[in-house]
Image (cartoon, grey):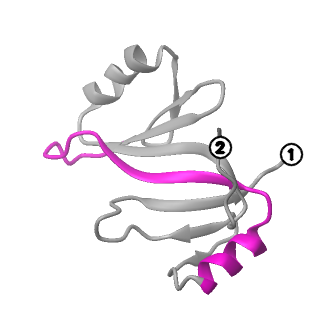
Amino acid sequence: MLEAHANGTLGLKSVLMKTGRESDASLLIKAFGAAAQDITNGHAFQMQNLSVEVSVSNNTKIGLLAIGLVFAVSDLEVTAAVLTANGVSHVKTQDGIVVPAAPGQGVAFLFEENAS
C-alpha cells in the first residue's frame, strides 16, 4: 500500500541512470523485458507504470549508476512548501522541482506535477 506523503507525492514516475558502456544499457533490455527506445545520448525503457532512462557517456570507468528518481506530485506548490518547511535544499525549474543529490542519498530527486 502506498503511504500518503505530506509533500503530495503520488508515486515514482521514472528512474534516471548513467553508464559508460553501451553493453550495460543493452543488458537492461533482458532485465526489463521491454524494448529500448533511443533518446539523446542513450535509451529509454517504458514499462506499464514506470520509465527508465539510461544515458551512455564516454567514461568507461563507470558502471551502471542510478542518478535520479522522478516522482509525480499532485501540486508542485505544496511540494515546495513542504521541502522548504523541512529545510530541504531545492531548485524550482520550468518542469518541476529538483532536490540535488546529498551525501548518503546518492541520487537527485525530481518532482513533476502529475498531468492527470
CB under 8 Å between discs 1 and 2:
no
Percent from the top left, x then y, of residue 12? Answer: 60, 45
Element at badge 1? loop
Residue 62, percent from left and from top: 19, 46
- Magenta segment boundaries in residue numbering: 56-85
Q: Residues within 10 Å of mark 2 (few under 14, many from 20)?
A: few
Mark in front: 1 vs 2: 2
Question: Which numbered marker is on residue 2?
Answer: 2
Q: Is the residue 28 above or below the residue 9 in the image?
A: above
Quarter in which the C terminus is drawn: top right
Residue beneath the point at 56% across and 60% down:
110
Kindly identify which numbered label has been placed on residue 93: none
Residue 47 position (above or below residue 57)? above
Q: Mark 1 or 2 closer to N-term?
A: 2
Q: Considering the image in quadrants, where does the N terminus appear? A: top right
User: In the rendered view, does 69 fall on the left or right side of 79?
Assistant: left
Q: Return the residue nearer the eye: 45 or 71.
A: 71
From the top left corner, tell me how far across and down residue 40 is, in percent: 49, 42
Amino acid identity at mark 1: Ser
Q: Which residue is mark 1?
A: 116
Cα separation, mark 1 vs mark 2, equals 18 Å
Q: Secondary structure at mark 2?
A: loop
Residue drawn at point x = 69 percent, y = 66 percent = 6
Q: Position of residue 49 (x, y in %)?
A: 65, 31
Above/below status of 10 relative to 39: below
Front residue of this view, candidates 61 and 50: 50
Q: Amino acid under label 2?
A: Leu
Does residue 74 belong to the magenta stretch? yes
Left or right? Give the position of 74 relative to 66. right
Name the residue furthest right.
116
